[in-house]
Image (cartoon, rainbow, N blue to C red):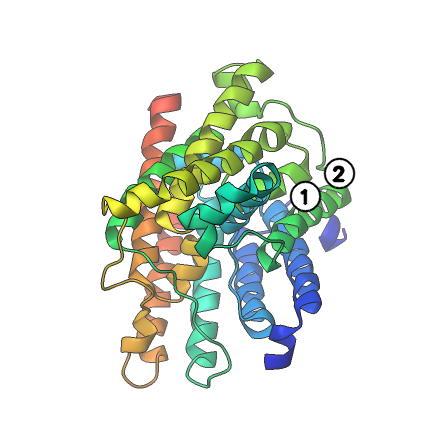
Amino acid sequence: MNVFSAYQWSPYAVGIGIGLLNIIALILSNKVLGASTTYVNVSGMIRKWIDPEYVKNNPFYSSNVPNIDWGFMLVLGIILGAFISSLLSGDFGLVLVPPMWANEISDSFFVRFIVAMFGGIVLGIGSRWAGGCTSGHGISGTSQMSIISWVAAMAFFIGGIVTAFLIYGI
Amino acid sequence: MEKLHQNKNMQLLIGLMMGIVFGFLLQKGGVTKYDVILAQLRLTDFTVLKIMLSAVIVTMLGVSYLYPKGIVKLHVKPGSIKNAVIGGLIFGVGFATLGYCPGTIAGAVGNGYLDGLIGGMIGIIIGSGIYAAIYGTLKDKKIISEDRFSGKSLFDSMKGNPFKYTLPFAGVLALIMVIVEWMGL
C-alpha cells in the first residue's frame, strides 16, 4: 500500500516530520511554525476594510500590522495539505457534527455550531493573551527552550483537560 | 540565505509549501479530527502528546546543532509567566470546547469538518478581534505584562555545547512517551 494513501501514520513519524519542517522553516524563512497570529491578522484585515481609522488607532494592530504574510500562507497551506492527505486516503468527508459530540452530547448541528463558535472566540482571546498556540508555544517555543512557552503549553493542557471533563464527565 | 529571507514573494510561496506539508502531516497524524483531540484531553488517547513531544525533540536537537553555528536565529515570544498562565488557561477552555486548535482547525477544514469552518474559524477570528480591542486596557491596567523571561531562551544561558543539556532533556521527554506506550495509551 502506498504510504501517501495510508489512513494514518505513526504519531512519532508525524512528530519527527513536523520537527524537521520546523528546522527547514528556520533555515529557509527565519521563522518557526505557528498558526494563531494569522487569525488576528485576518481580524485586522476585515476590520480595516470596514473601519480603517479604528485599525490605525488601535494599539494592538498598530504594532502588529495586519497583512497577508508567511503565516497566512502557512495556514492556507494547512487547509490544502490536509485536504490532499484526506483525499488520497479516502478519509475526506463533509462532517457537520463530530462523532464523539454527536454520540454523547447532541447531534444537532445548531448546538454544535454555537458551541464551536463560542469555543473559537475563547480560543482566539486565549491564544493572543498567552502569545501563541499549540504550535507556536507548544512546539516551537518549547523546543527553543523558552520557559514562558513551557508554562503556556502546560496551561493549555490543564485548562483543556479540566474543561473536557466538565463537558463529558469523568 | 539572507537574500532568500528578504524575497517577499518567494517567502509567501515557501510559507504555502510548508503549510501544505504541515497540513498533510497533521491529517496523517489524525489530529485534524475533533475526536482525536478530545480523546487526548479526556486522557484516553495520547496521539496529540506523542506528536508534540517528538516534534519538540527533533526541533530542539536541530536548534542545538544549528544555533551555535549561527545558521539559525531564535524566535522566542515576548510575554510573561503571568500571561502564559492566564492566557493559557483561557486557551485551554477554548481548546476543549472547540475541539481544535488554531493550526489543527485549518487541517480539520481541509478534512471536511464544517463545524470547524463555519463555527470555529469564524469564532477564532472574532476572539482575536476582541483581544485586539481590549489589548490597550489590559496593558494599561498591567493585567498583561512582560517579565524577565520575556523573549528569553535557555539556549542563551547554556555554557559550552548545548547538547550537554538538550540530550538529557530529550531523554526525559522520550521517557514520558515510553511510559505512555507502556500504559497502553
Dot 2 falls on a residue whose secondary structure is: loop
**Residue B28 pos. (x, y %):** 63, 48
- Of residue B16 and residue A83, the one placed in the foreground of this image is B16
- Please rate how many residues cluster around mark 2, counting C-alpha atoms within 10 Å: few if below 14, some from 14 to 19, many from 20: few
Q: Earlier in the sequence, mark 1 or mark 2?
A: 1
For the residues tagged 1 and 2, is the chain the same? yes
Image-based side of B96 in relation to B158, left or right: right
> Secondary structure beneath disc 1?
loop
Front-lying residue, B132 or B173? B132
Q: Quadrant of the N terminus of chain B?
A: bottom right
**Where is mark 1, residue-wise?**
A7
x and y percentages locating residue A110 in the rendered image:
57, 15
- In the rendered structure, find residue A131 and report the number of the disc placed on it: none
Q: Residue at x 63, y 23 (%)?
A: A96
The chain identifier of the residue carrying mark 2 reads A
Residue tagged 2: A90
Residue depicted at 39% across the width and 51% down the height: A131
Residue B1 appearing in the image = no
